[in-house]
Image (cartoon, rainbow, N blue to C red):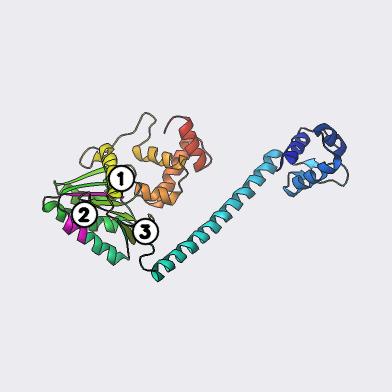
Amino acid sequence: MDDLSDAVYKQLIAGRYRSADDLADHLGVTADDIRPALDRLAKLELIRPAPDGVGEPVDPRLGLKQLLLRQMSGIDERLREFEEDRAAVMALIDEYTEARPGAGEVPGTSYVTGREAVAEELRELSGRAGAEWLAFVPDGSPSVSWLEQLQVLQRRAGARGVDTRTVTTDSIRGDTRAGLRAAWEAEPHNRVRTVPSLPVHLLVVDRSRALLPADPADPWHSVLHFTAPGAVEALTSLFESVWEGAVPLGAAAPTVDEHGLSPREKELLRLLARGLNDDAIRRRLGVSLRTVRRIVAELCVRLGAASRFEAGYQAAKRGWI
């Protein structure tokens, strides 16, 4: 609504004025100015038009709620259109890069695409590692098969005396990941720690090369290979920061805090408060979509929240996160 429509609506729901002339006098405008405002309110279904008079205002608890729902529907549509536009732009960029070899290249960065090509890149880096192997490996589908491959490569590097350190998610401690956990625990030179969530897959070798997924939703379909010192140093610093606060895999699982929240629940609330969707949260926590939705539902009940967004807000308001 514009300012005049807003002012007219507030006067109508207060029940003070029943004619356009009275409204115009009170608001300091002409009756001709009032009529477009009334038409706009009727179009928004906030008033019921009447042949004489200004009409009846719809209960704001109903009218404004319906208006908000329509606005949300419009947002969803715009987001869908944006995603279509983004996909079209990325397709054009790919076509341009293929047509102009080297046009999309950045010094110190190369692009490796295709699962077999990425797997070969990982094997090559494993064989090249001479001093250090640092990795972020979120647990859970779709990364679990890659997690197994990276375990093998990491063990090979560690057997040659390479200092290997891996951070994965707390979900690896679950019974369903017993085999993966045991494979790491059986190799004392392979140091592994866990955190509630990880932002992205990452591999840094000898602090001179680093791999990052091009698409977090499909982490090992295509990767960016960095050799630029600035980029590698930044990614190494990110690893060290997360490693410092992570819990060794062989140590006891983290306990609940004073609010009765497990580290995973607390992290999930933090991600909700940041506005992440369920799929993004699933990837960061290394759990299934079903598990995310179950935990969200349980937390909503505990917080008395009607939605995931309200749960994040309530958690922040109560000091839980």
Looking at the picture, which amino acid does disc 1 mark? Answer: Ala
Count how many numbered circles sit on residues in the image.
3
Task: Compute the Cα span from label 3 to label 2.
Answer: 19 Å
In the image as oriented, which residue stretches furthest toward the left? 160
Looking at the picture, which amino acid does disc 3 mark? Answer: Asp
> With respect to residue 71, does 310 lie above or below?
above
The boundaries of the magenta stretch are 124-139
- Please state the horizontal and vertical placement of residue 17, each as a whole percent of the image: 83, 34
Viewer-nearest of discs 1 and 2: 1
Q: Can you tell which mark lies on residue 151? A: 2
The residue labelled by disc 1 is 234
Viewer-nearest of discs 1 and 3: 1
Q: Can you tell which mark lies on residue 218? A: 3
Q: Which quarter of the figure has residue 109?
A: bottom left
Q: Which residue is at the front of the view, 262 or 1? A: 1
Looking at the picture, which amino acid does disc 2 mark? Answer: Gln
